[in-house]
Amino acid sequence: MALRYEETARLQRGLDGGVSALAFSPDGTYIAAAGMEDPKVYVWRVADHKLLHTYTGSRCPFLALEWLPGRSDTILCGSSDGYIAVLRLGSQELAEATGFWAHDYPVERLATQGSQLVSGAQPEVRVWQHLSNGTNVWRHVTDLQGPPKDSKNAEEQFIVMGIHWTKTRVHRLVVVVTYMHHGIVARDVLSHVCLMFSLYRGGSSVSPKGSIIALSVMGFGFNLYHLDKGDCIASFVDDTNGERTVPVLLVHGGLALFGGSTVGRAALWNVQNQRIHQTFAPKPYDTILAIAANYNAEQDRFLLATGGNDAHGKSAVVIWMAREYMWLSEAHAHIQSRRRVRCSLQPPIPVAAR
């Protein structure tokens, strides 16, 4: 018996030119999506695939989506004009749409922890505090400076590729910021102390316990690094044309790696043996530059989502749900026993610890 994902929905409303961002609500009830050339945010209900909300901002598309922790009624939307929209959802329509100007560059990264938000826009990284007065007002707390430069990257501009909240053995809560040319920096937000630094290129994802970081390496695939030691502990070589950075997520409690693609399919890797557990090829969409994942512990439900586009600019969000796969017919028991050796070469991904 193993978990295999099956397609359950294909959402194709709007999303011109490709899907720039995807995000499940914390409980997996909703999924939000934004288009690369479409200045709107769409929110669907996962259970029946119904489009519930459409938010139109300025003429600029949205590049980042982040739900408030533990809240399925509020989502933050980073725009390419530097604006962050704060949407509060009602049962039938948007109950409130506010926001604030946050950056002089496109807002491409958002990460929340409690009442704090960290936003990234190319060289700028800023920390915000949500005011606990019943409103959607966010107060600027501080700017996080970029990492030190050396002779190899002195001429390169800071470009933020990922922002993650995590914990270390010494500091209770830190922000990990990854840069395209200047490496990984972990900072204590309160003391502004720089905790670590190393070099890489690409997108990133941090494991639930915060000890492992997954990096998307342009033109190669994915690497796993130990945050405390800085050692590379696993590599996943994947087909890619090397022209775009593809997204990566650590899922199933950090036991699996989910990566996007520029060659027509996403892949779910088993971290323990570095083998592909399952591929996702939602034809005719040949480029997958947005992915999302959710686990609902009460329902024991795993969801993945891919946002793809084809050569003609048509796009779709495809939702996949994990199901337990087993032989259904006792008549095939002898076939199962014959194949047991071959199947054992690709062990199933263990279910995340409850």
Image: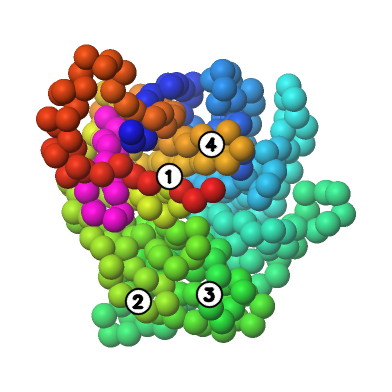
Segment colored magenta: 266-281
The answer to whether any part of residue 186 appears in the image is yes
Q: Is residue 280 magenta?
A: yes
Secondary structure type for disc 3? loop
- Asked which quadrant contains residue 138, the reply is bottom right
Instruction: Name the kind of residue labelled 3 in the image.
Output: Thr
Q: CA distance from mark 1 to mark 2?
A: 27 Å
Q: CA distance from mark 4 to mark 2?
A: 33 Å
Secondary structure type for disc 2? loop
Work out whether mark 3 precedes mark 4 in sequence or the reverse, and give the earlier one: 3
Instruction: Measuring from the top left, give residue 36's x and y in whole percent.
Output: 43, 38
Q: In which quadrant is the N terminus drawn? A: top left
* For discs 3 and 4, the disc positioned in front in the rendered view: 4
Residue pointed to by mark 2:
230
Q: Nearer the viewer, residue 148 or 339?
A: 339
Residue pointed to by mark 4:
300
Q: Tell me the number on the disc at residue 351.
A: 1
Instruction: Name the kind of residue labelled 4 in the image.
Output: Asp
Looking at the image, residue 111 lies above or below residue 188:
above
For label 1, the crowd category at 10 Å Cα-Cα, with few meaning under 14, some 14 to 19 and many 20 or more, is some
Q: Nearer the viewer, residue 53 or 294?
A: 294
Q: CA distance from mark 1 to mark 3?
A: 25 Å
Looking at the image, residue 281 lies above or below residue 113:
above
Tag 2 and tag 3, C-beta contact below 8 Å: no
Residue pointed to by mark 3:
168
